[in-house]
Image (tube, helix red, strand yellow):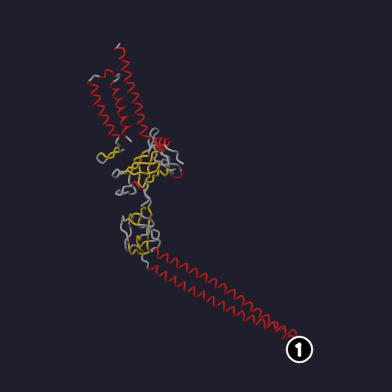
């Protein structure tokens, strides 16, 4: 009896162990390959490249490298002398423009008075001509014609004076516009003076300070980088095989390579495009397709943006843009299970 | 258990440690089973040993590796 059952027992024990081994091996493989985690996470931050708005000599640098600054703090100062001079010039121009506007106003009064005098003269000539016409019997024809012509001339002179009045009005409007222009120039000069102090646009850290007293700072060319203190985030580069189990809003565990610090975060977005590295454009605009092996394929990595929960950052941890982090997304089915048990969210 | 550990400044996945530990456990089990002659209840001892290793490694990996 025992001799008959032993081979069956031997086979069964081995078979069971082999089947269990296959199942466990497959599960481990799936766990390792498809569970959403990556070692390839990078801390990033938004960086403002600080450039002066006006050109000039740097007279004062108010910060040192890696200093913490608050929004509005002065970073460096450009020699304001030239801009004070420009402001004085603009103010003088404004005064001149205002004076010429006043002169134009006075000119209008003069021209209007002159027009009134011409009008009076025209009225006089006109009356004179009419009287002579009425006395046609005693006044010679020549004299009557002369009087008529004199009246016409006076009328033309009056009209000319009226036109001069319009001209003077236009000149005054021109002068008033010039005053506004001069005011704008003064405002611009004041702005230039204000912009000689380069200020921090955000709270943050000064980095890569490349400006010294005596440098010539050209407008628009960045002189230092300012890292926004509140803008730290993480880009996790996930293999494309892991993307199906990643969802926007999922909470993630972040583990910094530096000291193994744990942070909490949340997925805020998945990049919808990466460069196709196998197909750069070659010469003559032709595709330059990279030949690959048929049976070795590398999963591409897609950036997933993760916001760090600022409350979870320990006070003594130094976060620097460019640091490495491991990202572990809390598994979707675990979350779904929790959601089914909990109340439905509105 | 962390996902990776530093071995002489080289970061290696901690599943490597699990692997080594499983090898050790397998060696112990193999010795015990061999001493008490339990391999007579097994069809192909080599196949059994390999399968046993995969059972150990799979279970330990799924349990310990996050």
- Residue A183 appears left or right of A2: right
Indicate the position of residue A144 as horizontal and vertical percent values. 72, 85
- Residue A187 appears left or right of B16: right
Indicate the position of residue A214 as horizontal and vertical percent values. 32, 64
Quadrant of res A60: bottom left
Can residue A291 be seen here? The reply is no
How crowded pointer 1 is (Cα within 10 Å; few <14, some 14-19, many 20+) is rated as few
Quadrant of res A146: bottom right
Q: Is residue A305 above or below residue A50?
A: above
Can residue A232 be seen here? The reply is yes
Residue underneath mark 1: A138
Which quadrant does the N terminus of chain A fall into? top left
Indicate the position of residue A75 as horizontal and vertical percent values. 35, 60
For the residue pair A328 and A54, the one nearer the viewer reads as: A328
- Residue A21 appears left or right of A119: left
Q: Is residue A285 above or below residue A19?
A: below
Q: Is residue B47 above or below residue A32?
A: above
Q: Chain of mark 1?
A: A
Q: SS at mark 1?
A: loop
Which residue of the protein is positioned furthest toward the bottom in this rendering? A138
Q: Residue at x 32, y 16 (%)?
A: A8
Which residue of the protein is positioned furthest toward the front in this rendering? A343
């Amino acid at each position: 009896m025992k001799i008959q059952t032993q081979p069956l027992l031997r086979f069964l024990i081995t078979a069971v162990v082999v089947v269990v081994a296959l199942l466990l091996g497959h599960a481990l493989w799936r766990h390792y390959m498809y569970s959403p985690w990556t070692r390839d996470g990078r801390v990033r931050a938004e960086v403002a490249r600080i450039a002066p708005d006006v050109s000039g000599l740097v007279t004062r640098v108010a910060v040192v490298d890696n200093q913490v600054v608050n929004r509005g703090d002065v970073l460096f100062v450009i020699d304001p002398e030239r801009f004070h001079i420009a402001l004085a010039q603009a103010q003088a121009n404004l005064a001149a423009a205002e004076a010429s506007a006043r002169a134009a106003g006075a000119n209008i009064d003069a021209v209007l008075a002159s027009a009134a005098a011409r009008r009076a003269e025209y009225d006089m000539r006109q009356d004179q001509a009419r009287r002579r016409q009425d006395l046609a019997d005693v006044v010679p024809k020549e004299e009557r014609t002369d009087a008529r012509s004199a009246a016409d001339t006076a009328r033309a002179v009056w009209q000319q004076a009226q036109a001069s009045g319009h001209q003077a009005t236009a000149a005054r409007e021109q002068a008033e516009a010039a005053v506004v222009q001069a005011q704008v120039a003064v405002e611009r000069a004041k702005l230039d003076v204000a912009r000689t102090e380069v200020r921090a646009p955000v709270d943050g850290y000064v980095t890569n300070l490349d400006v010294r007293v005596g440098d010539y700072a050209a407008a628009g060319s960045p002189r230092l980088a300012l890292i926004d203190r509140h803008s730290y985030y993480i880009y996790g580069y996930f293999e494309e095989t892991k993307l199906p189990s990643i969802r926007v809003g999922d909470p993630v565990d972040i583990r910094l390579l530096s000291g193994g610090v744990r942070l909490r975060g949340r997925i805020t977005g998945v990049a919808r495009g990466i460069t196709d590295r196998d197909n750069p454009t070659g010469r003559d605009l032709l595709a330059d397709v990279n030949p690959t092996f048929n049976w070795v394929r590398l999963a591409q990595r897609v950036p997933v943006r993760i916001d760090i929960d600022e409350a979870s950052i320990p006070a003594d941890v130094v976060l620097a843009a460019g640091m490495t982090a491991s990202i572990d997304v809390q598994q979707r089915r675990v979350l779904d299970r929790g959601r089914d048990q909990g109340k439905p969210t509105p | 258990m962390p996902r990776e550990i530093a071995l002489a400044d080289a970061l290696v996945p901690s599943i490597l440690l699990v692997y080594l530990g499983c090898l050790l456990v397998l060696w112990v089990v193999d010795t015990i089973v061999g001493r008490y002659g339990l391999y007579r209840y097994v069809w192909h001892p080599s196949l059994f040993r390999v399968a046993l290793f995969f059972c150990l490694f799979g279970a330990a990996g799924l349990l310990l590796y996050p």
